[in-house]
Image (cartoon, rainbow, N blue to C red):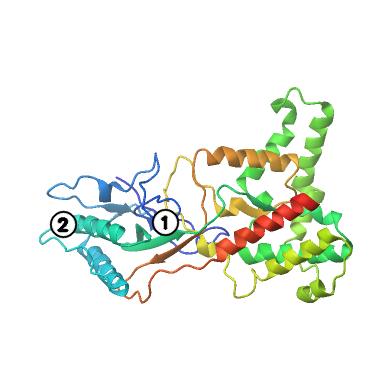
Amino acid sequence: MQIITEIPDGKPGRPDNQRSRFLKCQPGRDLPKKTEVATGRKRNAFLTGKVSPIATDYYMENETDETETNLTTSENFDFLYRSALRYAGLMGIKLPFRPRKGGSPRMNIAGLYRAMDEALPEQVNLEEKAGRLYFCLYRFHEWPDYTLFWIPIDFIEKISVPVRCIVREFIRRFIRHHGLNMVKETWYYELALEELRDWKNRDPDASPQEVRRNSLLAESYDNGKISKALKRMEGKPFCVRLEDKIRECRTETKRERDLLGLVSEGLELITPDSPCLIRYYYDWAYEKEPDFPPVGLDTQIMLAYSNNDMLAENMESYFNSDCRETYAITPVTYMYLTPETDRLFRMDDYPERLSKWMQRFMQHIAGSF
């Protein structure tokens, strides 16, 4: 029996709504033609398996009391059917589906899903929430594949004092706005830290100086200067009236003027009315116990100390290794359908604007400091 379960919620970089994957579909990135799922990932057998003349029901196992709930009920089909009719009406099309008289709810749900998947330009998942089935429409945003936006702070020591406070405060606000983790909160960090501490055994050819250098770096990350610098980014503001500070700041170096320009642009992306990345977190291929969990946005975008030290190099190696085994979560706009849905699916361009800015910001830091 296949188990459908809820995704934990409430953590930065995780969805803030509880939901369960009933169907998983990997379409690629908004291709004109919907594609099949990737190798090793199969659509739910309930929807794609051969339906026998007397169709069996489909159950969800409740984790709390281990009881089972039948999802393929007449009530669930009625909810899905009314949701589909409503959305087809909003699109101005006729729903290409008619329920089978005398057919089981399972057969009708499977047929309705196929009709929706073929008729809509968006990708379609079938999901469970609180014992009820929903159609979920979604599209991928344009986002650089397998790109790490690890925002460093070590470069700040290389800029003048007036600019230093401005940049620190901006990064502090940026991290807070998006609810991003710092490097020490990822599981890659623990692996990389252990590797630094055990460098002598991992690299028998390493010199005593290299072993000591990596050991000191691990200590600094664990409870030293680097740890304190990262912790400070979670504290009180470095300055007030940030926008005024930027306008009043005068610097003679072009690299600092360009940096202030990028900071000004970045502030426009974290206004009180700006969305945060959590809003776009959607794991379209969720599995309760995957062989390899996906690489989350909270791993791809986070606060780092440096992108050039040995710990960062080790973490990037683990990231690359995971990317060969699984997929990476990228921003997605999604929408659940109900019989009361009153608008068509739409998406903004915030993730696109954010990623383009982050690329320029990170490139300037790497090339100028």
- The disc at residue 6 is 1
Q: Under tag 2, what secondary structure? A: loop
Q: Amino acid at mark 1?
A: Glu
Q: Nearer the viewer, residue 280 or 19?
A: 280
Q: Nearer the viewer, residue 94 or 320?
A: 94
Q: Amino acid at mark 2?
A: Ser
Horizontal and vertical percent position of residue 213: 82, 36
Residue plotted at (23% across, 63% down): 77
Q: Under tag 1, what secondary structure? A: loop
Q: Is residue 294 left or right of residue 249?
A: left
Horizontal and vertical percent position of residue 7: 45, 56
Looking at the figure, which quarter contains the N terminus? top left
Q: Nearer the viewer, residue 136 or 219?
A: 136
- Quadrant of the rendered image containing residue 167: bottom right
Q: Nearer the viewer, residue 169 or 289?
A: 169
Residue plotted at (85% across, 54% down): 158
